[in-house]
Amino acid sequence: MAKGESCILKMQGITKDYFGTRVLKGIDLELKPGEIHGIVGENGAGKSTLMNILFGMPVIHSTGGYGGAIEVKGNPVSIGSPFDAMKLGIGMVHQEFMLIPGFSITENIKLNRELTKSTLFSKIFGPRLESLDIEAMGNDAKKALKSLDLGIDEWSKVAGLPVGHMQFIEIAREIDKSNIKVLVFDEPTAVLAESEAENLLKAVRKLAGEGVAILFITHRLHEIMAVCDRITVLRDGGMVTCVERTRTSMPELARLMVGRQLDEAVRIHPDTSAKPLALRIRNFSVDMPGETAKKIDLDVHEGEILGIGGLAGQGKIGIANGVMGLYPAKGEVSFFGKPLPLNNPKGAILEGLAFLSEDRRGVGLLLDMSIEMNIVSSAMVIQGKFLKKYGFFTQVDKAGVRRHALETIKNLDIRCKGPDQSVRRLSGGNQQKVCVAKALALDPKFLFVSEPTRGIDVGAKKLVLDTLVDLRDKLGLTIVMTSSELAELRTICDRIAIVNDGKIVGILAPNADDTDFGLMMAGDYDAR
Amino acid sequence: MSESVKSKNRGLSLGTRKFLTNNVVTILFVLVGLGGLKVSGLSIPFFLDDIINRVARNGFMVLALIIPVLAGLGLNFAVVLGAMAGQTAIIMATHWGFGGIGGILLCVVLSFPFAYVMGLLTGKLLNKTRGKEMITTLILGFFANGIYQLVYLILIGTIIPMNNEVLVLSSGVGLRTTIDLTDGLKFGLDNVVKIPLTLFSVLAGAAAAAGAVIQYLVRRRRPLGGKARLNWMVAGLVFGIASMVWGVYQMLNQSMFSFLRVPAVTFAVIVLLCWFIHYFTKTKLGQDMRTVGQDSHVADVAGIATDKIRVTAMIMSTVLAAWGQIIFLQNMGTFSTYGSHENVGMFAIASLLIGGASVAKATISQALIGTVLFHTMFIVSPLAGRVLFGDAQLGEFFRSFVAYGIIGLSLALHSWKKRMQGKLK
C-alpha cells in the first residue's frame, strides 16, 4: 500500500456485540479512491454487520452501537443513520432491491432526492410543497442510465423489468448522487444471470475508473479475482487477512474463508457404504423461492448422517423441503427401494420420514401450546396416535399423551417446568429438542434436520448435535442434516454434500481439505 | 386456471376485458342506478336537482379520504373525528350568533385547531398499530363518539359554561338533540352565488375545453406518451363542447332544466380541492407520501421520515373532513347533535369504493364518480322499492345493505388480491 495515497474511508478496530455475543472482533478496513476492495466470508462471518455499521442502520444503534472508529477523508465521523451515510457520500447497492415497482425508473432513481421548483404555494406553505421538476428529474435519470450503457426509457415502470435491469437502476440511483465517494455492492451478482453479471462487473470497473471507491461483497471468488484490487477475508467476525489480489489465488482465499474451526475430537464414522440405500434421489428439482434445487442426484445409505452444506440461497434447504412435499418438486425419489409420492407431506410422513424445519418457531412448533401437545401433535393428526375412539368421535388420550411426554422429556433431557409449560418460554436449544421429540413421536426411520442450531447459543449447540448422533447410534435412524455452518457439519456428519447454484457440486469427507470446501461453496471448484 | 378463463373470454379483446374486471363494481352500480331511475319513474330534472345538491353536500368529504389512501393508510374511517371538529366549530359559531358566509369562514378557522390535534393523535396512534390502520380508525371513531357525547351531554353547562336557551336543554346541562341553523349558517356557502344549471353547464364546458387544450400545449414534457396525451385532450374537448351545446340548447328552450340552480361557490370549493390534491401529489411531500404508501421499508431506507409523513397525511385528512362536514351541514340546515357525524365515514367510504377505488388506490375521478353513483342509489332506491314491492322501506334496507356490503366486499377483495400477490412472490 502506497503511503502517499490518502484513504477515503478508514475503519479501525470495529467491534460489535449483540446481546453479549461478540459478532465483530476488531475489523480494520482502508479504502482508497478508485479502489475496488473485495470482502469475502461465509454466512455469518460479519460482512452484513460491518456494512450495517458503515450505514448507521437502526439495528446497530438499537442494540447498543459499535466499538472502534470510522474516518472519512481523514476526519473522524459518527454515522448515526442511513441519512448521515448518504451525506458523507457513502452509497449502497442492496442485495434485495430497494425499488418501488409501481413507480417509474426516474422516480426510483430520484427517490427522496427529487428535484423541485418553487411555486406560489410553496412560498406560502414552505419548501415541502414545492412541486417536482419532472423534466429535470427525467434528464438526470437519463444521464445516469446512459453512463451505465443502459438503453431503457427512463419513464417506464420498474414492475416487470428483468432482474438485471433492476440492479442497474439501483446502481444508477447511487451514481446519480453527485457526491458519491464510496459505493458498496452487497452480493450484487447473486440474482443475476451469467451475462448480466458480466455487464455488472464492467460497470463496477467503469465506476472505479471514475474515482469512486468500491466495496465489493460477494462469495463468488472468481468475481473477486476478476475485479478487485485488494481483498479482505472475514471469518467468524474476525479479520483473517487483507491481501492484494496479485499476491493470492482462489484456492488460498477459499482456505482462508473456511478455516479449520472444528475441535479435533475425531468421531468414529461407521462405514455405511455397504448398507442398503435409504433414500435415492434422481433428477430432483424443487421450486422453493430463494432456495431452488435443480436436478439433484443423491444417495443416502441406511444409518449414516449425511450433511448438506453450502451458502444461503444456493438451494440446500430446498432438498429436504422438496422430499417432504412442502414445496413443489419433481423428479424421482425412492425410499428404502419404494418410490416415494412427491408433493404429499402426509404421504412422506406415513412412509416413515420426519422433518425438523429450518423455520423452527414458524413451521416447527405451535408456540403457545404446551410441550406435550407439541410433541404428539403430528403423530396425532397424521397417524392417529394418542387418540381414543368413541364411534365417530375421537378424543385426546390425555393420560397416554402425558406418559409419552414425560418419558421423552427425560430421554432428551428437555429442561422445562413440566409437560404443560408453553413452548414459547423455552430456550432455543430446548425448543429444538421439542422439535426432535415431535419428530420421534412419529417413529420415523429417516430424519431430515434443517439448520438445527440456528439461533441457539453455543453451549446448547453441542447438546443438539450430540442428540442427533445418539438418535443414529441408539435408534438406528438415518439422518440428513442441512446446515449453513460447515463447522458443525464437519463435527457430526459422515459425508458432506456441498450445494451451489441449486446443484450438488461434490461430496466430501468431513476431514477433507479446507480449500476444497471453500471452492465448492463458492462455486469455483471446477475452475481450480 | 388462466387457461380455462382465457378460452372462455376469447370473444373480448384484452383491453376491454381488463377494463371490465378493473371496474366491475362501478359498472354494476351504473347499471343498477340506471335501472332504478327507470323503474322509479323520476323525472330527469328532479333527479338532477337532487343529485347536484347531494354532490355539492358530500363531495368534499369523499375527497378528504384520498390522501390517507395515497400514504398507505387505507380507508380513513376516522373522518368521523374530523366531522366532530367541524360540528364543534358550527356549535360555537351558532352559539355566538354568526351566520352567512362570514360564519362559514369562522367555522373553517375554528375547526382547524380541533381537527389538527385530532389528526395528530390519530396519526400517532396509527404509527403504533401498523398494518391494522383501518380497524383502528373504525374503532377510534366509536371511541371518539363517546368522548363527544360526554362533552356535549354532560360537560356543557357544568364545566363549560354556556348560556343559550335555544341550544342548551332546559335543565341547563347538555345540548339539545337537534340544532337548527336556519337563521344562521344555513346555505352560508351555497347561497353566495347560485347560477342556473344551463349557465353552469356552459361555463364548466368552456373551462373543460380550454383546460384540455392548455394542458396539451403547455405540459408537453409530461411523461405521458404522445398518443395518450392527445386522447385526453380530445376527450376533454368533446366533453366541454357537448356540455356547452347542451347548456345553450336548454337555455334557449326554456326547459325544466333552466330552472335548476347550482351552488356555484360550493362547486368551486370542490374543484379547488380537486386541483389541490392533484397538485399535492406532484409536490415533494406528496411524492414522499406516495413512496411511503407503496413501500414504507424502502421509504425508510431512502431516508424518508415515514412516521412523520403518515401523521401529516392523517392531519390533512382530518382537517379536510372537518371542512367537509361544515359544507354538509350548512346545506342540510339542521343537524342532529349526537348523530350527524356517525355515518359520515361509512357513507363517504362507500362512495369512494363504488367509484372504483380500493384500499390501496384512489383517484379524484373515482371519488367524484362514486359520490354521484352512491347518491343516485340514495335518491332512487326508496322510490324504486315502492314501485317494485309497494314499500319504500325495502329500498331503504337496500340502501344500507349497499353501503355496508360494498365496504365489506372491497376489503375482502383487497386482502384476497394481496394474498395472491404474496403467493406469486
Image (cartoon, coloured by chain):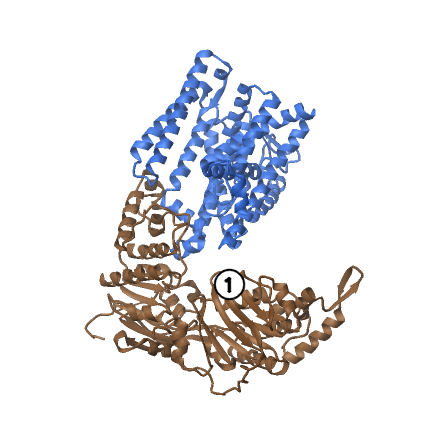
Which residue occupies 68% across, 73% down?
Answer: A419
Residue under numbered circle 1: A286
In front of the other: B319 or A405: A405
Res A133 visible: no
Image quarter for residue B348?
Answer: top right
Residue lying furthest left in this view?
A4
Number of marks in picture: 1
Q: Amino acid at mark 1?
A: Val
Number of residues whose C-alpha sits closer than 10 Å to that of mark 1, classed few (under 14), some (14–19) or many (20 or more): many
Query: Would you place residue B362 above or below residue B182 in this image?
Result: below
Image coords of residue B240 (percent x, y) = 39, 24
Image colour for chain B is blue
In front of the other: A460 or A386: A386
Image coords of residue A478 (percent x, y) = 58, 77
User: Which chain corresponds to the colour brown?
Assistant: A
Image coords of residue A312 (percent x, y) = 45, 68
Res A255 visible: yes
Which residue occupies 26% across, 52% down?
Answer: A146
Q: Relative to residue A398, is residue B72 drawn left or right?
A: left
Residue lying furthest right in this view?
A391
Check disc 1 and report its element: helix, strand or loop: strand
Image quarter for residue B364?
Answer: top left
Image quarter for residue A353?
Answer: bottom right
In front of the other: A178 or A341: A341
In front of the other: B400 or B64: B400
Q: Relative to residue B269, is residue B152 drawn left or right?
A: right
Q: Chain of mark 1?
A: A
Residue lying furthest top in this view?
B253
Image coords of residue A151 (percent x, y) = 29, 50
